[in-house]
Amino acid sequence: MRIRTIAVIGAGILLVAGCGGGPDEKQARTAGNNAELRQKAQARRPPAPPPPRKINCDRVKCVSLTFDDGPGPYTARLLDTLKGRGVRATFFMLGENVHAHRNLVRRMVMEGHEVANHTWSHPDLTGLPPAEVRSQVQQTQKAIKDASGVAPTLLRPPYGATDKTVGSATGMPLILWSVDTLDWRYRSVTRDTRVGIKEPQSGGVVLFHDIHKPSVESIPKVVDGLRKRGFTLVTVSELFQGQPLKPGQTYTERAQKAKAVTASPPPPAPSASPTSSP
């Protein structure tokens, strides 16, 4: 009986010691709890897009790849290609296509791409009254913002068709292009690749369509080819950094600053030849 009592008391002492712990153990337990709380807070915090890049396209050889009429069935593959190569592009989207691909629109923003407006249903805006022009633009603005959290600041009028009435009704900078790959017409990977690599010049805006499979399939080689030519691939807004874009104005490329040219001295006048005697 006495031995049993002693054993019970000893076990109680050990239990109390284990529960109390020393100061080091308490500090470790507190640190662990704090780390767990930080992890939970980070898990609750929504992911954020990458920060804007500062690129001086007056000093760097820039070109902007743009994609119209999506999102579509090949847009996810295009985003995979751009992400794998560390490229940012600009997507001019149709509002009517956004709802079915909300996850892709959100992904564009999260991966640093620029989302932009291409109207709701791709009409020729010059044939519409101002109220309908505004409706085409505003519906698309809302659809893209609802899907991505970002309201576009740029508009590409379908077919590049615009006039003063369209510019006034939209109230946004109108972005056209300097290189039309005509990918919608030819549907050729080989041709899209050749044009996409060879035709762009510094400050250029290149037009593709991510709703066409050959266009998307050409992009890996286009990106590699442009980089071999020394280009930095940027979004449209990055391309125009330092050159404010005005609502209603049309832009096809970044205007390059003229370089100072030192004129060569005129060639010396020919010396007079001696007059021969008769």
Image (cartoon, rainbow, N blue to C red):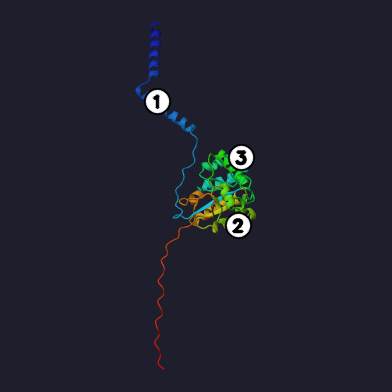
Dot 3 and dot 1 residues touching (CB under 8 Å): no
Residue 235, compared with residue 7, is above or below; it is below
Circles 2 and 3, Cβ within 8 Å, touching? The answer is no
For residue 82, above or below residue 30: below
Amino acid under disc 3: His
Kindly report which numbered mark, 1 or 2, lies closer to the viewer in this rendering: 2
Q: Could you classify mark 3 by the number of other residues whose Cα lies within 10 Å: few (under 14), some (14-19), or many (20 or more)? A: some
Residue 17's x, y, as percent? Answer: 37, 17
Three-letter amino acid code of the residue under disc 2 = Arg
CA distance for labels 3 and 1: 47 Å
Q: Which mark is residue 244?
A: none
Front residue of 239 and 216: 239
Can you identify the residue that label 1 sits on?
Answer: 30
Amino acid at circle 1: Thr
Residue 45 versus residue 195 in the image, above or below: above
Q: Secondary structure at mark 2?
A: helix
* Whether residue 235 is visible: no
Q: Secondary structure at mark 1?
A: helix
What is the CA distance from the residue labelled 1 to the residue labelled 2? Answer: 64 Å
| Residue located at (60% from left, 51% from top) | 215
The percent coordinates of residue 42 (x first, y second) are 46, 33
Instruction: Report the number of numbered marks.
Output: 3
Please name the residue that numbered disc 2 is placed on.
Answer: 191
Mark found first going from the N terminus, 2 or 3: 3
The image's mark for residue 99 is 3
Q: Nearer the viewer, mark 3 or mark 1?
A: 3
Residue at 52% x, 52% y is 64
